Image (cartoon, rainbow, N blue to C red):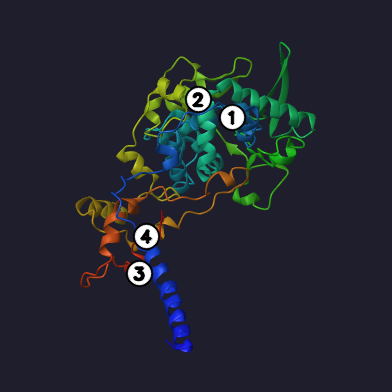
């Protein structure tokens, strides 16, 4: 063979290899069985064996609320153990911003949420904080269920640091006092006026003095009105009525219920006592550690759980959502709709900054309806051409689940 013809043949073979190999590499994997409909892998999936939260992790978690009044701290910790109901309550307050005072108490009688969750509707800013950062709220509740005393001790350590730094003091919004219990100094924070309360807004990276745990920077939250950041300020005064009924036995390491204000707000007739977690208000959210699972019982995600997480940015499930769900139940062979893909991107970023951002995306689509149709979407996307010796490459990227919404 002439030399120039041999050279041409070599180049041609090299080009053919360069074309064929990527095509073979892009052949789709065999269709996988359709995944069951899930709400959130983080909230609802069984958890592996979990270690205790460290001192550093606890202070990281309680940093954004440690300087709140005692009653509010206690009720936030209680409510954080019911993350699904907090999401529902945050949605409700966003839709009913003008319902306050006596009208709010009346409206809460119609809700089935835990009383701790109902009480937070009087402070929408707090509900918004908890709703905007679900991963933080879930960890806060998990830690509180498993290590209640450690969590309250962490609050006291941070209060002592803020006091020593000169950043926690009495004023027209709050009253700060100290008490000695044995060798421990207890710092208490109460509203200056029990009927009008002010929720503090502060930067925990500064207000406690230099933060000592670089590996665990504190979470913090600025309401929209303080988006530019602030060292320490107070929200507008809120007429609280009987919505704050919680308290903390700081030395004893547990939280309790003031039955007088509790009964007035919830229109009940309990006799008081220490707070007890109610698993029925957990509504399918998995417990983190084995001790909590053994104590309160593991639960499987329910239809109510899946429904409530849809539209968690503040809007309840729409008629279109319910129609899509009904259609999906009749025909699982249909791929994810354009509306489903658009909905996955509608969640607004949370208002948290700082810690926790590397531990998971700030926004997730907690209604993974497209996951159940990965197999059928891949098979439908293949062109109806004559059979070939090797499997054909799916057109238009159809081998990707949900049209690119969650490629494995």
Q: Which residue is mark 2?
A: 145
Mark 2, Cα crowd under 10 Å, few <14 / some 14-19 / many 20+, is: many
In terms of depth relative to the viewer, which is nearer, 61 or 402? 402
Q: Earlier in the sequence, mark 4 or mark 1?
A: 1
Mark 4, Cα crowd under 10 Å, few <14 / some 14-19 / many 20+, is: some
Judge whether residue 244 can be spotted in this image.
no
Q: CA distance from mark 3 to mark 2?
A: 48 Å
Callout 3 secondary element? helix
The answer to whether the residues at label 3 and label 2 have Cβ atoms under 8 Å apart is no
Instruction: Name the mark on residue 396.
Output: 3
Q: CA distance from mark 4 to mark 1?
A: 45 Å
Mark 3, Cα crowd under 10 Å, few <14 / some 14-19 / many 20+, is: few
Q: CA distance from mark 4 to mark 2?
A: 40 Å
Q: Earlier in the sequence, mark 3 or mark 1?
A: 1
In terms of depth relative to the viewer, which is nearer, 118 or 98? 118
Q: CA distance from mark 3 to mark 1?
A: 52 Å
Q: Can you tell which of label 3 and label 2 is closer to the viewer?
A: 3
Instruction: Name the mark on residue 73.
Output: 1
Q: Can you tell which of label 4 and label 1 is closer to the viewer?
A: 4
Callout 4 secondary element? loop
Instruction: State left or right for residue 53 relative to residue 390.
Output: right
Residue at 37% in and 65% down = 24
Q: Quadrant of the N terminus?
A: bottom left
Q: CA distance from mark 1 to mark 2?
A: 15 Å
Callout 2 secondary element? helix
Q: Quadrant of residue 267?
A: top left
Question: Vertical placement of 353 versus 384: above or below?
Answer: above
Q: CA distance from mark 4 to mark 3?
A: 9 Å
């Amino acid at each position: 063979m002439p030399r120039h013809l041999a050279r041409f043949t070599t180049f041609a073979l090299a080009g053919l290899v360069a074309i064929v190999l990527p095509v073979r590499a892009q052949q789709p994997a065999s269709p996988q069985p359709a995944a069951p409909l899930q709400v959130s892998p983080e909230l609802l999936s069984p958890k592996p064996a979990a270690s205790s939260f460290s001192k550093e992790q606890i202070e990281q978690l309680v940093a954004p609320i440690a300087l709140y009044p005692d009653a509010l701290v206690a009720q936030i910790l209680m409510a954080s153990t019911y993350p699904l109901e907090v999401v529902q309550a945050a949605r409700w307050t966003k839709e009913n911003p003008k319902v306050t005072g006596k009208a709010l108490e009346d409206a809460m009688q119609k809700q089935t949420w835990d009383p701790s969750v109902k009480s937070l509707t009087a402070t929408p800013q707090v509900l918004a904080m908890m709703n905007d950062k679900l991963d933080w709220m879930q960890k806060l509740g998990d830690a509180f269920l498993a290590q209640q005393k450690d969590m309250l001790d962490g609050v006291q350590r941070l209060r002592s640091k803020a006091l020593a730094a000169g950043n926690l003091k009495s004023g027209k919004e709050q009253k700060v006092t100290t008490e000695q219990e044995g060798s421990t100094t207890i710092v208490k924070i109460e509203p200056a006026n029990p009927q009008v309360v002010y929720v503090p807004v502060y930067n925990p990276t500064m207000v406690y003095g230099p933060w000592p745990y670089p590996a665990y920077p504190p979470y913090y939250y600025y309401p929209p009105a303080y988006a530019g950041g602030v060292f320490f300020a107070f929200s507008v005064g809120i007429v609280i009525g009987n919505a704050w009924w919680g308290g903390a036995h700081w030395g004893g390491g547990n939280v309790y219920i003031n039955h007088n204000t509790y009964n007035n707000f919830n229109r009940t007739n309990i006799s008081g006592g220490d707070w007890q977690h109610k698993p029925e208000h957990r509504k399918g959210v998995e417990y983190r550690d084995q001790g909590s699972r053994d104590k309160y019982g593991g639960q499987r995600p329910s239809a109510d759980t899946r429904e409530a997480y849809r539209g968690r940015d503040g809007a309840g499930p729409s008629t279109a959502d319910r129609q899509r769900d009904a259609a999906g139940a009749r025909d699982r062979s249909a791929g994810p709709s354009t509306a489903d893909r658009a909905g996955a991107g509608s969640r607004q970023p949370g208002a948290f900054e700082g810690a926790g951002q590397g531990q998971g995306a700030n926004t997730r689509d907690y209604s993974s309806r497209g996951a159940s149709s990965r197999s059928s979407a891949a098979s439908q996307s293949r062109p109806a051409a004559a059979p070939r010796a090797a499997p054909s490459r799916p057109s238009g990227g159809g081998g990707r689940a949900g049209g690119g919404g969650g490629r494995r």
